[in-house]
Image (tube, grey):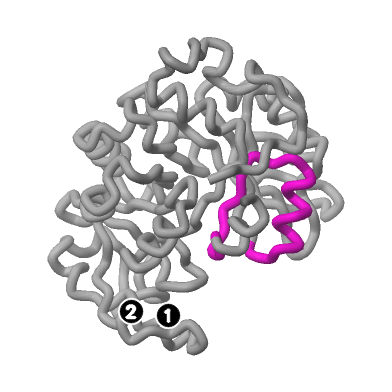
Amino acid sequence: MQRLPLVTAVSLGLFAGAAATPAMSDTSPLEQQLKDLQSFQVIAHRGASGHAPESTMAAYELAHEWEVDYLELDVQITSDGELVVFHDDTIERTSDGEGKINDYTLEELRTLDTGTWFNEANPDSADAAFAGAPMLTLDALFDRFGHDARYYIETKSPQLNPGLEEALVETLEEYDMVESGRVLVQSFEQDSLLKVQALNDDVPLIQLVWYSPSEEDDSRLVEWTGVTPGSAEITDEDFQEVAEYAVGLGTNYLYDGREVIDADFVKQAQENGLPVHVYTVNETDDMERLMEMGVNGLFTNYPDRLLELVE
């Protein structure tokens, strides 16, 4: 599948690991994955979640069928130490249960219906086959797609999921997802990423950021966790601090309709070794605008829309 080249002219050496990449015949799968981050990436947010219930096998099957670059997912850990693919801190919105993931064992969670809510919320896209969809495990996702897909995994709410990083790295190593160049691990929590790095420093990491107006001064942008200054105030040194442990940056583009990053931000991040992936972009006009800004990839619930633009 053809991919749109970066609009911004960047040299191979700008991105983490690129300068040391040997000739193509000698490139390892992990090195190739990092090199591929220089090209535009189509990231299926919770699968093709505009068309099927998010974080279910149906949503990932559809995204994989469309040959997206990454299947994006959130992982949390059950009370008995199993990894499940689920986004929210509580399970009410997208299941018929209530409470938190780690209030339950995997066996208990597997009795829940994580598909019917989608049919009720999206009658135009409803499918009787979605009803009764069980909660998905990371093992099941890996067993289904193996090394035929790449995975963009968020350590979700690590403060609510003690032991998450250890269980995730163990699973990634068990399925040989790291050295085979199959996985990126993302988080808003820098400490979570550093914990993953300490467990296996070959895991490619993506620092997530969220820019919004300061409560004290609406004209000034700040970053949610303070991992960087606001996007208008960020310096080369700030980007370089992130690039010490991460191979890319995931950011929002809008806050309440207001643009919080621009082409200069994107270019500066890239010049400091950080490809920029933007979440979550569902409208074609926004996709085109961001591609013109030179971003390296987009998270979207509608990967079919984005694929039409990049093919």
Earlier sequence position, callout 1 versus callout 2: 1
- Residue position for label 1: 118
Residue under label 2? 130
Residue situated in front as seen by the camera: 208 or 20: 20
Relative image position of residue 156 (x, y in whole percent): 41, 50
Q: Where 61 falls versus 67 (above or below)?
A: below
Tell me which residue sits at (69%, 20%) in the image: 11
Q: Check disc 1 and report its element: helix, strand or loop.
A: helix
Q: CA distance from mark 1 to mark 2?
A: 8 Å
101 magenta-colored: no
Residue at 61 percent of width and 41 percent of height? 40
Would you say 141 lies left or right of 304 here? left
Callout 2 secondary element = helix
Say what amino acid the circle numbered 2 marks: Phe
Residues at marks 1 and 2 touching, judged by CB atoms closer than 8 Å: yes
Characterize the local packing of mark 2: few (<14), some (14-19) or many (20 or more) Cα atoms within 10 angstroms. Answer: many
First to last magenta residue range: 282-303
Indicate the position of residue 179 as horizontal and vertical percent values. 33, 26
Q: Please tell me the numbered disc located at residue 198.
A: none
Which amino acid type is marked by label 1? Phe
- The residue drawn where x is 76% and y is 26% is 235
Q: Nearer the viewer, residue 19 or 191?
A: 19
